[in-house]
Image (cartoon, rainbow, N blue to C red):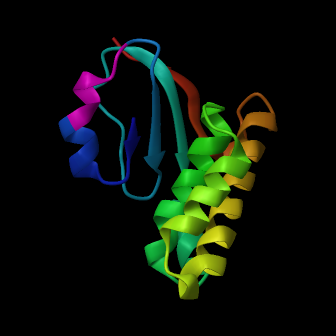
Amino acid sequence: MVALSQEAYTRFAPELKDGGMLIIEQDLVRVSDLHKEFQIYSIPATRIAEELGKRMVLNSVMVGFFTAVTHLLEPDAVRKAVADSVPPSFRDLNLKAFEKGLEYGHTALTSTPSRSDAVLNAQYAVE
């Protein structure tokens, strides 16, 4: 599950199954009231997008991060999908945002055991 807002987290987190994965926008979502065990990854996607000059590319940042941490899709295929899904005038910016998210995700997976601040306590187990 990917949650970019507190409202989305509050509404859909109860549906996440044990062993699942939760990816959150770390500046906008506070994790609480978990009664299951799953991996939680967080990324400051909004901040990264703003550093690139346009907050609206935070979705592309998140798509890159999702691609890196889930290993569900080939980066080249997702990169092409991102390029094909945006107007030509925003293509370069969205591809740059995708790459930043991908890079952040790879760093999250290869960092020290705490996985730096890209992973929120690596794995939550809340009673």
At a point 77% along the width and 46% down the height, the residue shown is 107
Tell me if residue 58 comes above or below residue 125 in the rendering: below
At a point 69% along the width and 40% down the height, the residue shown is 74
Q: Is residue 79 left or right of residue 32?
A: right
Q: Quadrant of the N terminus?
A: top left
Q: Is residue 116 left or right of residue 7?
A: right
Can residue 115 be spotted in the picture? yes
| Residue farthest toward the front in the current orientation of the protein | 84
In percent of width and height, residue 43 lies at: 56, 52
The question of residue 68 being in magenta is answered with: no
Tell me if residue 53 comes above or below residue 125 in the rendering: below
Q: Quadrant of the C terminus?
A: top left
Q: Is residue 106 left or right of residue 66?
A: right
The question of residue 14 being in magenta is answered with: yes
Can residue 46 be spotted in the picture? no
In percent of width and height, residue 41 lies at: 55, 38
Q: Viewer-proximal residue, 65 or 112?
A: 65
In percent of width and height, residue 89 lies at: 56, 88
At a point 37% along the width and 57% down the height, the residue shown is 28
**Residue 103 lies in quadrant:** bottom right
At a point 67% along the width and 42% down the height, the residue shown is 68
> Could you tell me how many numbered marks the image carries?
0
Q: Is residue 39 left or right of residue 6?
A: right
In percent of width and height, residue 30 lies at: 35, 45
Tell me if residue 17 comes above or below residue 29 in the rendering: above
**Residue 13 lies in quadrant:** top left
Principal SS element in the magenta part? helix
Q: Which residues are magenta?
A: 12-17
**Residue 110 lies in quadrant:** top right
